[in-house]
Image (cartoon, grey):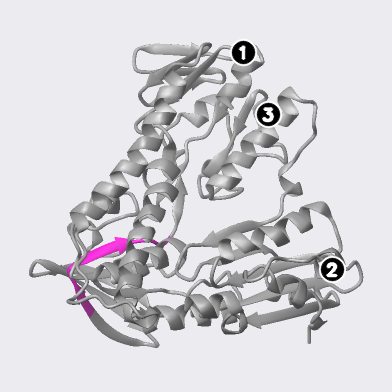
Amino acid sequence: MVRRLVAAGQKVAVIERKCFGGTCVNTGCTPTKTLVASAYAAHLTRRASDFGIRIDGPVKVDMKAVKARKDAVAGASRRSVERSLKTLDGCTVYEGHGRFVGQKSIIVGDSKLDADRIFINVGGRAAIPTIPGLGQVPYFTNSSMMDVDFVPPHLIILGGSYIGLEFAQMYRRFGSEVTVIEAAPRLLLREDEDVSKSVTEFLMEEGITVHIASNVTAVDKHGNGVNVTVKSAGKISQCTGTHILIAIGRRPNTDDLGLDRAGVEVDSRGFIKVDDQLRTNVSGIWALGDCNGRGAFTHTSYNDFEIVAANLLDNDRRKVSDRVTAYALYTDPPLGRVGMTESEVRQTGRPALISTVAMEDVSRAYEKGETKGFMKILVDRDSKLIVGASLLGLAGDEVVHSILDLMYAGAPYTVLERAMHIHPTVSEFLPTMMQDLKPLQ
């Protein structure tokens, strides 16, 4: 956004409280996927004999080296963002916490800034549940986990969704005993049951303990570790570990911005209310990224920028409702998701078609020895448009873009059905799947 505004002849002030690059660069995508890569390397090394490779002795994980690699990757990205802003003509960087003192006035440190256009993109942080005793024991969040340079002997994770499961598999592969406690009746509740079941199965096969439909009622110290009291099906049990990771959700960083002084409205959860073009109720103030509740991903935040810039600078009336839901779960194998789930399609009552294929039947996956998961695509029977897909398997987070692009193009599934894809790849099965569509019963 800054570069677009400067290129348009605007003078821009950027206020950053702590780390340039935000969640993605510092505590989200960049560092966690770097850690996932190290965990995958450890896992694959342990499987070396499956590929005819002999490694004598046990695989050892040097977490200080793993953290150092993560810090180097994330640090380079952070420094690049900071350097680009501080050397950009027309841009002035203010480091500190900014707060509104009026509708178009902000203070940061000793400086008071007034502007006709203000863009709020303050991100979010881990939500901390109200659990008796939690305040008396140390715990990790996704942010503080970035400082860990050791393998926790037994990591208890509260929350069985995207962040929690990525950390669960990662640290199990690093060598931790891992227990996941989820209050919902299954992991990944927003996904279809077959996706949830498959993910649960391959995590448990790696030795991760999973408790579903389980509510944590208390936390207390247990020697040098922690004890978690769990209530499930009316029964009380104890889970003792060495460390706790809180991964039950996110909350926006909007509670200390002085939004009331600007008259900017928020909802009951603290998310800034915006319209389809990301304008707040106050003219000249926009909210982008995690703080507006319209998406909790780097790609949705970037798309927010594209929407605002298009409307403001290009006379291009883009809007949030035009985008297709798309995200990924970075377990191994990963889940690539676009559009509607099978459950959501069923709820609409529309006539639909479905095609599925098990990853064990995909030659590329079989050759690589990574056959867990499946692919599922849903089509509107009458319009012939693809309405959703769940690709849980090798390269699912990349292959899914073939479907996403077709959905944005508004093209019928027959375009993909008649395409010639390269062999041997995972993507080559997409045309075959389109040739094997069946009515959704």
Say which residue appears at 77% left-offset and 71% top-offset.
Answer: 431
Gap between marks 1 and 3 measured at Cα: 13 Å
Identify which amino acid the numbered label 3 is placed on.
Answer: Ala
The percent coordinates of residue 184 (x first, y second) are: 47, 75
Q: Which residues are magenta?
A: 239-248
Q: Is residue 124 above or below residue 341?
A: above
State yes or no: discs 3 and 2 in contact (Cβ < 8 Å): no
Q: Answer few, some or many: residues within 10 Å of disc 1's Cα (few below 14, many 20 plus, some between 14 and 19).
A: few
Q: What secondary structure is found at the residue carrying circle 2?
A: loop
Q: Answer few, some or many: residues within 10 Å of disc 2's Cα (few below 14, many 20 plus, some between 14 and 19).
A: few
Horizontally, residue 52 falls left or right of residue 431, namely: left
In the rendered image, the quadrant that contains the N terminus is top right
Q: What secondary structure is found at the residue carrying circle 1?
A: loop
State yes or no: discs 1 and 3 in contact (Cβ < 8 Å): no
Q: Earlier in the sequence, mark 1 or mark 3?
A: 1
Gap between marks 2 and 1 measured at Cα: 48 Å
Q: Answer few, some or many: residues within 10 Å of disc 3's Cα (few below 14, many 20 plus, some between 14 and 19).
A: some
User: What is the tally of numbered marks visible in this picture?
Assistant: 3
Gap between marks 3 and 2 measured at Cα: 37 Å
Q: Earlier in the sequence, mark 3 or mark 2?
A: 3
Say which residue appears at 45% left-offset and 31% top-offset.
Answer: 257
Horizontally, residue 168 falls left or right of residue 412, namely: left
Identify which amino acid the numbered label 1 is placed on.
Answer: Gln
The percent coordinates of residue 24 (x first, y second) are: 44, 44
Q: Earlier in the sequence, mark 2 or mark 1?
A: 1
In the picture of the structure, the residue carrying the numbered disc 2 is 418
Say which residue appears at 23% left-offset and 81% top-offset.
Answer: 238
In the picture of the structure, the residue carrying the numbered disc 3 is 309
Mark toward the viewer: 3 or 2:
2
In the picture of the structure, the residue carrying the numbered disc 1 is 10
Instruction: Name the residue nearer the viewer: 256 or 187.
Output: 187
